[in-house]
Amino acid sequence: MSPTAATTPPPKLALVASSNPVKIQAAQQALTLAFPNSDWQIEGISVPSGVAEQPLSEAETRLGAANRLQALQQHNPNADFYAAFEGGFARIDGQPYTFAYVAIADQQRQQIGRSGTLPLPETIAQQLETGGELGPLMDQLFNDHNIKQKGGAIGILTNNLLDRSSTYRDTMLLLLAPFLHPELY
């Protein structure tokens, strides 16, 4: 190779705490938008949340995202970036909602934040509170299969104006502000 030939740096490794294509796609889109001059190799790795399969509070959902992030960091402490997504349910002033917590980190900093909230039908909320999980309940209600790896409850209940991946992506983009402007944080 001649001394003037440009070399392409290797892609940066980003680990996502899931094998769900919706979550992997959200991380890929957010990182590509935020860092357009970087190439990303995204790997989905299933890691435990340490919380119930269907978290039933803000605190439990946040803890699940934080636990998944920590598990990723322990799995490969040399990755360039980490992202974890945890969907949850809670009642806010009596109204049932679903939302997600997103936890991200690189080698210098970490951010955890919550997505917007989606009101849920009372019938779904009652089933969640008695041990159901949102994805399978939505599959049953809408006679579909594996909604959580498609648009999710968000897609169905907003007539696909939004979907699960876009909500995760946008939440992650907001959390990336300190990574984009470290001098301000």
Image (cartoon, rainbow, N blue to C red):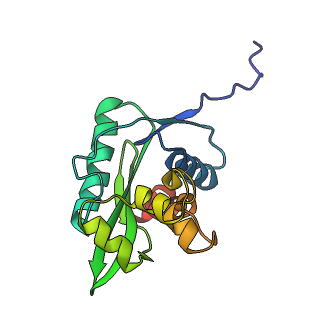
Q: Position of residue 45 (x, y in %)?
A: 42, 35
Answer with the quarter of the image where residue 37 lies: top right
Residue under the point 34% across and 78% down: 96
The C terminus lies in which quarter of the figure? bottom left
Q: Residue at left 57%, top 62%?
A: 166
Q: Residue furthest top?
A: 1
Image quarter of residue 90: bottom left
Residue in the foreground of this view, choosing between 98 and 129: 129
**Image point (43%, 68%), residue name:** 115
Q: Position of residue 39 (x, y in %)?
A: 63, 38
In the displayed structure, would residue 42 be above or below residue 116?
A: above
Q: Is residue 134 left or right of residue 173?
A: left
Q: Is residue 35 left or right of residue 55?
A: right
Q: Position of residue 26 (x, y in %)?
A: 55, 52
Foreground residue among 60 and 128: 128
- What's the residue at 32%, 53% (across, down)? 65
**Residue 51 drawn at (x, y percent):** 22, 51
Check the image and report above or below for 47 versus 52.
Answer: above
